[in-house]
Image (spheres, coloured by chain):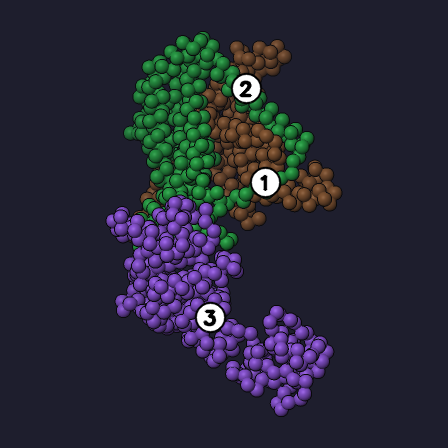
Amino acid sequence: MITLSHVTKRYGERDRAFAALEDVSLEVAPGSLTSLLGPSGSGKSTLLRVIAGLEAPDSGTVILDGVDVTGVPPQRRGIGFVFQHYAAFKHLTVRENVAFGLRVRKWPKALIRERVDELLDLVGLTGYRDRYPSQLSGGQRQRMALARALAIEPKVLLLDEPFGALDAKVRADLRAWLRRLHEEVEVTTVLVTHDQEEAMDVSDRIVVLNEGRVEQVGLPRELYDRPANAFVMGFLGPVARLGGRLVRPHDVVVSAEPAAGAAEARVERVVHLGFEVRVELRLAGDGAVSAQLTRQEAEELGISPGDAVWVSAPTARTVIAG
Amino acid sequence: MGTTAVTVPTRRRARPTRRLGGAGALGFGISTLWLSVIVLLPLAALVDRSLHDGLGEFWRDITARQAVAALRFTILISLAVTVINAVMGVLIAWVLVRDEFPGRRVVNALIDLPFALPTVVAGLTLLALYGDAVAYTKWAVLLALLFVTLPFVVRSVQPVLLALDREMEDAAASLGARPATVFRRIVLPNLTGAIVSGAALAFARAVGEFGSVVLISGNKPFDTQVTAVYAYKQVESDNATGAAAVSVTLLALSLGVLVALRVFERWATRHDR
Amino acid sequence: MTASRLALRFVALGYLAAILVVPVAFILYKTLEPGPAAVWRSITTPAAVHAFWLTIEVAAIAVPLTTLFGMVCALVLARTRVPGRSVLEALIDLPFAVSPVVIGLALFLLYGREGWLGPTLAEAGIQVIFSVPGIVLATVFVCLPFVVREVTPVLREVGDEAEQAATTLGASPWQTFRRITLPAVRWGLAYGVVLATARAIGEFGAVSVVSGKVSGETETLTLLVEKRFTNFDLAGAYAASGLLAAIALATLLAMTLINRKGAVA
C-alpha cells in the first residue's frame, strides 16, 4: 500500500545540516498496522509527515496505493492524520469537527449527518455530539480526532504519537481500543511511537528507526528475539552485558556453584519487583550486570547482597558480539 | 508544549495573590483619586456644561445642521477606515507572522510608527506627499485616518496568530481542505476576537481624531469636517456649551464602542475556558 | 515559494509603503530639502527653541507622574483583591476613547475662568488654562493608561511567588518591591515609559484647546508646526516636523530594542 524509496530529508544549512531522514526505503502492506519506533530525533515523525505530504522530502519517492504522490499536497493523498496534541478545531463542536472533511468535499447534509453519527458511535462519543473540544478529556479528544480522520474514508491512517499526551492508564486503554478498532475497520495504519511496549502490543510489524535510518523491520517477536544490532536490542528491551556479549537479563543464570564458562560476581542488590526479582551484580573482572529471576528462582537460590555467585547465559537466545 | 490541545492565551491564569489588606486599599484609593481628579472630574465638568442651557438647548446643539453633517461624515469615514484597516491588518499580520523576508523585523517595528509620530506631523506629511490633488478632500481625511489607525488590528491579531495551533491547519489540510479553505474555516474563526478588538479600538480612535485631519481636511463644513474639528471651531467661536454638547455625543460614541467591545470579548473567549 | 505567498507579501508591503513608509521618508526628505543650514536656522529660532524645551519640560513632568501612577495602579490590579478593581481597570482605558479636543475642552471647563475650579484657583493666583500647568494636565490625561497597561500583564504573568519568598526571608515591602518586583517588570515598565513619552511629546489636540498658543510661552513643538503651516511657512513647518519625526523614529528604535530585550530576558 505504501512504498517509500530512498527518502532523504535534511534540515539546516550546509555544514550545520542534520539529516532527519537518510535514504529510507520501506514497504507497508495493505490493511496492516505498522509502527515506526524510535527515540526522539530518530526521524519517525518526519517520516510520517512525509508520507502524509505535510513535509516534502529532499529526494526519494512516496507511492500510495500504486500512485506516485511525491509532489502531491496532503489534501489530495487520501490520508487521514491524527496528531499527538489532537489538533481539535476548538471553535467547532465535536460533530462539526468530525464532519469537517466531508463538508469540504461537499457531501450532502443528510449523508454527512449519517456518517458522523455512525463514526461517533464507533468511537463511543455519541452523547458528546454538541460539546466543544474544550469540554472533553484528552482521551475523548483523541477519539474524536480518530473519528474525524476516518470520516473521509482514507486509504491510509497515520497516527503521530497519538497517546503521548495522555495518562498511563488512558494510554493503555486506548491502545487496546485502537487495536480492536483496527480489526474492525481494516485501514492500512501507520503509527509513530517511542514506546516499545506500545509498538509490540499493537503492531503487525515494527520499523525501528535511529538517527534517520531504518535499523530493522519485522514482526515484534522477531525484533525482540533476533535484533539486527545492539541498538535495536537495547531499544526493544533490557540488556545485560556479559563476557563480551549482550544478553537479556531474563536469560542470565545465577548459581551458587561455579559452572563451566561462568563468570564470578558479587551480589550488590536484590530488588523485589512484585512477580519478578532483579538481581544487580558486580562482576569480578569489571562491570555490572542485571539478572532477572522469577520469585521462585530467587527463593530457591536464597541469595542476599554480598554473596559470591556465578553468572552465565548458556541458553540465551539473543546474543550479539559487543 | 503542554499536554493540552487548546492553545492557552499567552497570559497564564492569575495565581491566587495574597490580600495586601491596608496597603492594597491605600493603593486603590490613590489610584482612584488620581484617576478621578485627572480624568473623571474634567469629563464631569464637560457633561455639566453641555447641559448648561438646559436639555432643549443641548438637543438643538447636537442637531444643528453642521453638527449633524460633521457627525455623519465622521462616522461614515471612520467605519470605512476601520473596515479597510481590519482587512489589511489581518493580511499584514499574516505576512509578518507566517512569511519570511529580509527586513521583516524592520517592517514589524515600523507598524508602531503611528503610535510614535505626532498626529499633526502625520497630517502634514500626507499633505506634502499627496499634494494638491488630494488635499482638502475626503480622500485626505481617509488617508490620514488610515495612517493613524493602522497598528490597531495588526497588533491585535499578531499574538493570536503566533499562538495559533498550526496543527489545526495541518489537520484541515489532511482532511482535504485547500489553503484558502483552511484560512476561511480554521484560521479566521480563531482570529475573530482579535480582529473585532482591534477594529473597535481603531474605530474609537478614528471618530475622535483631530491632529492629523485639522490641517489637511480644509475643514469645509458639510463636506470634509469631522466632529472633533467642529467642536474645536465651536470653542474658538466662544460657544463652549455647544462644543460641550457635541463632545458629549462623541464621548458617548467612543464609550459605547468600548463597552460593546468588552461584552463581545467575554462572549468570544467562551471556547477557551 | 508560491505565487500566492508572493502576492500576499506584495500587497501587504505595498500598502505599508504607501500609507506609512513613503510619507515619513518624504517628510524627512522635504525637511532636508532647503539644506542643513536652513533647517538648523529654522529649528533654532527663539520660538522653536522655546517650543522644544517646553515640550521636554512638559514630558519631564507628565511621564514620571504617569509612571508613578501606573506602577501603583498595576500593583493594585495585579497583586490585590480589592473589590472594584475591574471598574478601575475599565476606567483606565478612558483616555483612549476620548478625542483630544474633548479632553482639552473638558479641562478648559474645569479649570478655566468660568469653570468649576477656575475662579477658586485664580484667587489663589494659580492659572491653569492658557498656561503651562494646563498643558501638563492635558498631557497627563492622555498618557495615563500607558504604563499601567504595559506593567499589569507582566506582573500577572510573573506571579508573586518570588515576592512571597522574599517576605519569608525577612524583606520589608519596600525592599521586596525594589529588589524583586521592580526588576521583574523593568522591560514592561521601560516600554510603557517610552510609549508615554512619545505620546506626551506628540500631543496636539488637547493642548490646542488649553494652551492659548502663545508663542514663546505656551507653544509646544506640535503647536509650532501648526502655526508655521497656517502662516504659510511650509519650510519652517517641515523643519519642526522633521525634528518631531526624528524623535519619533528614535522612540521607535527604543521600543524595538526594549521589545527584544524584554523577550530575551
- Tell me the mark number nearer the camera, choosing from 3 and 1: 3
The color chain B is rendered in: green
Residue B94 seen from this side:
no
Label 1 amino acid?
A: Leu
Residue A209 seen from this side:
yes
Residue annotated with mark 1: C155
Residue annotated with mark 3: A200
Chain containing the residue with disc 1: C
Same-chain status of marks 3 and 1: no
Query: Looking at the picture, does residue B146 appear above or below residue A177?
Result: above
Which residue is drawn at the image coordinates 57% and 23% (left, top)? B36
Query: Looking at the picture, does residue A286 appear above or below residue B148?
Result: below
Q: Secondary structure at mark 2?
A: helix
Residue toward you, B32 or C85 = C85
Residue toward you, A47 or B264 = B264
Which residue is drawn at the image coordinates 48% and 76% (left, top)? A224
Query: Looking at the picture, does residue C150 appear above or below residue A52?
Result: above
Separation of marks 2 and 1 at Cα, in angstroms:
29 Å
The color chain A is rendered in: purple
